[in-house]
Amino acid sequence: MLDKDFFSLQTDRFRIEGRSRSGHETFFRIRELGIALDLGRCPDLIVSAPQVFITHAHVDHCAGMAFYAAQRHLQRMPLGRLYVPEEAAGGVRELLAMHERLANTHFDRTEVVGLGLGEVVRIARGREVVVHRASHRVPTNAYEIRENDTSLLFYTGDTDRAIFERNEAMFKAEVLIVECSFMADGDQARAVKYKHMHFDDIADFAERFENRMVVLSHFSRRYARSSSPRRFCFASISRSA
Ligand SMILES: [Zn+2]
Ligand SMILES: [Zn+2]
């Protein structure tokens, strides 16, 4: 069943592959850019990404970090970088060091880099990733991919509606991946409590979106696949330029 959640979405400029379910696993792979956004439990297609941008330390987004580091070591791959919120960097390094001790190995092909608001990281093809901040229960980065003056993609990570009130860039990006953990009537309070987004929050800001494609992700497992179309696990709305 789980593999059926895997999706592949072609945008104007690149293909996004991944899987996203709240509390279970979220990762997105963009091969053209050599990056991953979150790594979930680290499936094989993430291991080959030299730059992985992790939004926050909840395990559904980063459980596979040690596997990533171990695979890059075993396969003698070039240095890979795990970018994490700066507040989480020390803990992530401790976690990986613990795995190194337990396994009597050395993750010499992986580096952990802490990122704070406004920092910029160069990626493939002259593009760059700009760090924004989401509004969640733990420090959470949102990531924007830019090329010159064009915003190609904005990924919110887990967040509540406060990100809409403090961030302009997300409304202008060509592609926006926004979390939408909750959709059903009655789940609004749950979204507030756990600092996630309800579809009503997105609807409240509907006139602000200038994006060509808006991708809703991170749906709660409370919503059964059997009661919804396949697209429900990963809905996208696109409009022509
Ligand atoms: Zn999550
Ligand atoms: Zn989270």
Image (cartoon, rainbow, N blue to C red):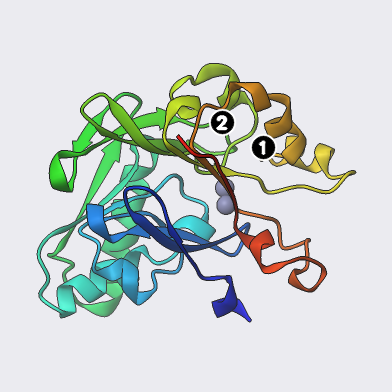
Quadrant where the N terminus sits is: bottom right
Mark 1 and ligand 2: say if the CB distance to the nearest ligand atom is below 8 Å.
Answer: yes
Quadrant where the C terminus sits is: top left
Q: Secondary structure at mark 2?
A: loop
In the displayed structure image, the side of residue 74 where residue 154 appears, left or right: right
Residue 195 tag number = 1
Disc 1 to disc 2, how far (Cα)? 7 Å
Q: Nearer the viewer, residue 71 or 21?
A: 21
Residue 16 drawn above or below residue 226: above
Mark 2 and ligand 2: say if the CB distance to the nearest ligand atom is below 8 Å.
Answer: no
**Disc 1 residue crowd, few under 14, some 14–19, many 20+, Cα 10 Å:** some
**Disc 2 residue crowd, few under 14, some 14–19, many 20+, Cα 10 Å:** many
Residue at the location (52% across, 71% down)?
6
Q: Secondary structure at mark 1?
A: loop
Q: Which mark sits nearer the N-terminus, 1 or 2? A: 2
Residue type indicated by callout 1: Lys
Residue at the location (67% across, 37% down)?
195
Residue 178 drawn above or below residue 32: above
Q: Which residue is mark 2?
A: 135
